[in-house]
Amino acid sequence: MTWLLIVVGGALGAPLRYLADRAVQTRHDSVFPWGTFAVNAAGSLVLGGLTGAASVGAAGSGTMALLGTGLCGALTTYSTFSYETLRLAERGWRFLALANAVASVLVGLGAVFLGLTLARDLLG
């Protein structure tokens, strides 16, 4: 049954990622991959919140499978982040490539920590 929850979550997260990525990217006239940056930050925040909720007993394994593994797994994208960073570097925008790599890691870690802390404080 867990696999079905993951499939359903993934089926929701993948189109959500695509739509959110396009919505953000079309609003920026920039080569910087703002769409991917935004969905990865949002997914990190959600996953941190889910992890915090699970740590205080407010989210069970089914919720984690559906939303954590399925939804967040499909919403966030390490492969696209890597590809876009490489493309920036190949096109000569090395500073933007470095900024994307550093900012993505720092913002992702900050978002997951913020989500974790907020969930523990609000639910614990």
Image (spheres, rainbow, N blue to C red):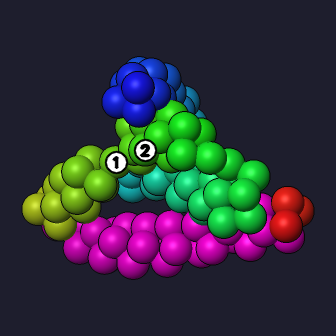
**Residue at (59%, 39%) from the top-left corner?**
63
Quadrant holding the C terminus: bottom right
**Residue at (47%, 53%) from the top-left corner?**
40
Q: Secondary structure at mark 1?
A: loop
Viewer-proximal residue among 105 and 49: 49
Q: Earlier in the sequence, mark 2 or mark 1?
A: 2
Residue 4: % across, % down = 39, 23
Say if residue 3 shows up in the picture.
yes
Q: Residues within 10 Å of mark 2 (few under 14, many from 20)?
A: many
Viewer-proximal residue among 20 and 58: 58
Q: Main secondary structure of the magenta part?
A: helix
Looking at the rendering, the stretch of residues picked out in magenta corresponds to: 92-121
- Tag 1: residue type? Thr
Residue 105: % across, % down = 42, 73
**Residue at (65%, 57%) from the top-left corner?**
54
Q: Is residue 67 above or below residue 42?
A: above
Q: Which mark is residue 77?
A: 1
Residue 60: % across, % down = 62, 47
Say if residue 41 shows up in the picture.
no
User: Which quarter of the figure has residue 2?
Assistant: top left
**Residue at (54%, 38%) from the top-left corner?**
62
Q: Is residue 54 above or below residue 1?
A: below
Q: Is residue 96 left or right of residue 124?
A: left
* Residue farthest to the right, as pictured: 122
Asked if the magenta segment contains residue 93, the reply would be yes
Q: Is residue 85 above or below residue 8?
A: below
Asked if the magenta segment contains residue 65, the reply would be no
Q: Which mark is residue 69?
A: 2
Viewer-proximal residue among 102 and 62: 62
